[in-house]
Amino acid sequence: MIGFFPMYLAGGFGIEFPLIGFPELDTSYSSSGWVQMSHLMTGCLMIGAALSEIRGEMSLATFMHYHWALSLALLKWQLGPTSTTLGSAMFLLPHFFTLWSTAMYVGGKGETKNKKTR
């Protein structure tokens, strides 16, 4: 998640990375004010989720459930007509996290790493 943050942040300000920017990932991509705002919002949510994961505040069940939704959304796009080979390849990692977290959860590892009580 953190690895994608710079790309979303730059895209939010209309700056596209060469070779791996959004135009290289999807043939229908077009940067607009709405898309830039969506990139910035996505970046904010990515950082929030990543911090929650890193700090051990997110349960394995929550991690698994949001990766199920993320994998479905990505798979719909990856199998669609506008994703490029590079785009599909760059967004394979979330599917591995989906499989890993599901296997861990089914295997009985559903507790949080660091339970915090207040």
Image (cartoon, rainbow, N blue to C red):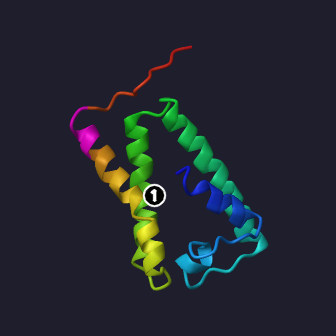
Magenta span: helix, strand or loop, mainly?
A: helix
**Picture quarter containing residue 8?**
bottom right
Left or right of 9 on screen, residue 54: left
- Say which residue appears at 39% left-offset and 78% top-offset: 79
Task: Please provide the residue range marked out in magenta.
Answer: 103-108
Q: Position of residue 26 (x, y in %)?
A: 54, 79
Q: Is residue 53 above or below residue 93?
A: above
Most foreground residue, 3 or 67: 3
Q: Is residue 100 above or below residue 79?
A: above
- Say which residue appears at 30% left-offset and 47% top-offset: 100
- Say which residue appears at 57% left-offset and 37% top-offset: 51
The furthest residue to the top: 118
Q: Position of residue 42 (x, y in %)?
A: 63, 56
Question: What amino acid is at disc 1?
Answer: Leu
Q: Position of residue 11 (x, y in %)?
A: 69, 66
Q: Position of residue 106 (x, y in %)?
A: 23, 40
- Say which residue appears at 67% left-offset and 62% top-offset: 39
The furthest residue to the left: 107
Dot 1: what SS?
A: helix
Q: Is residue 40 above or below residue 63?
A: below
* Residue located beneath label 1 in the image: 70
Most foreground residue, 113 or 118: 113
Q: Is residue 19 above or below residue 111?
A: below
